[in-house]
Image (cartoon, rainbow, N blue to C red):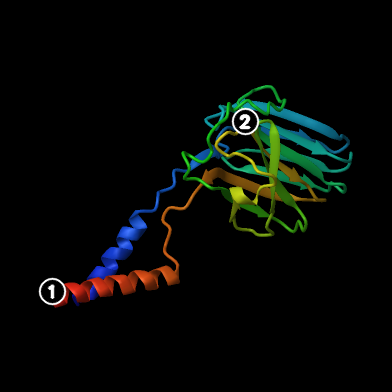
């Protein structure tokens, strides 16, 4: 095995030290949908159905709601096996659905129910993340809303047209207004359906950078500094 030169060893050590100095993320799971739920709006009916379940999630409860805008077609939402599944069959006007985490099990939004939960994990986490997939649903979107101090702030995530789960990320900085993610009272995800829309959603969480790799300009400065230090020590010896 070829050994590193002294300069290369110094550069490698400096890079590792720089990366190690970056804080590690501590993901906070909001929901991974392990508790089974089924909401159904059959053909011939329209309106809204709701269900609330105790689950090992943020706040201890998940509240589900689904709305069908037309009597035609069928809308079924399930969370079995461990995936949120929205299936709209022949619904010409589409529908909508929400998932709410507010620490209350009553199907009514409590904008302070989470008691000022710190989603940043002490300042490390900086984005919502998860996975999505859909089928031929142009214009379909998911809106994430958080309430801080009773005031809502939102960010919109397009639902991808993909047979495979596609990771998404919504940076805290992309939300409207100036929310305080260290003081969150409620979280809601809303899906604005399009006609005949099917999609799945899972692994909803907040996360942050695991290691901040220096930019090329930073690496250059780091390299020049390490080389200068090596040459100076070599001259002194």
Instruction: Give the percent coordinates (x, y) of residue 7.
Output: 23, 75
Nearer to me, 230 or 192: 230
Instruction: Give the percent coordinates (x, y) of residue 108.
Output: 72, 25
Q: Quadrant of the N terminus?
A: bottom left
Residue 4 in view here: no
The mark found on residue 171 in the picture is none
Label 2: which residue? 185
Residue at the image point whose x is 10% and y is 74% from the top: 237
Instruction: Give the percent coordinates (x, y) of residue 57.
Output: 54, 32
Q: Is residue 11 above or below residue 173?
A: below
Q: In terms of image quadrants, where is residue 42? A: top right
Dot 2: element: loop
Nearer to me, 44 or 179: 179
The mark found on residue 236 in the picture is 1
Question: Seen in the image, is 237 located left or right of residue 12?
Answer: left
Nearer to me, 180 or 48: 180
Instruction: Give the percent coordinates (x, y) of residue 137.
Output: 76, 56
């Amino acid at each position: 095995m070829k050994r590193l030169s002294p300069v290369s060893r110094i550069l490698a050590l400096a890079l590792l030290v720089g990366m190690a100095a970056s804080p590690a993320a501590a993901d906070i799971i909001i929901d991974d949908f392990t508790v089974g739920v089924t909401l159904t709006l059959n053909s011939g009916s329209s309106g809204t159905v709701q269900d609330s379940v105790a689950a090992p999630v943020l706040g201890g409860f998940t509240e589900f709601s689904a709305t069908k805008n037309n009597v035609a077609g069928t809308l079924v939402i399930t969370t079995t096996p461990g995936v949120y599944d929205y299936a709209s069959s022949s619904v010409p006007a589409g529908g909508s659905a929400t998932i709410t985490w507010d620490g209350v099990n009553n199907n009514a939004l409590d904008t302070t129910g989470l008691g000022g939960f710190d989603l940043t994990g002490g300042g490390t986490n900086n984005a919502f993340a998860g996975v999505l997939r859909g089928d031929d649903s142009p214009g379909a979107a998911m809106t994430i809303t958080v309430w801080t101090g009773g005031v809502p702030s939102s960010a919109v995530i397009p639902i991808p047209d993909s047979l495979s789960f596609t990771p998404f990320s919504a940076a805290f900085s992309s939300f409207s207004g100036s929310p305080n993610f260290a003081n969150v009272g409620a979280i809601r995800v809303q899906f604005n359906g399009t006609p005949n829309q099917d999609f799945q959603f899972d692994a909803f969480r907040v996360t942050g950078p695991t290691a901040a790799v220096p930019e090329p300009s930073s690496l250059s400065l780091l390299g020049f500094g390490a080389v200068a230090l090596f040459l100076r020590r070599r001259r002194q010896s």
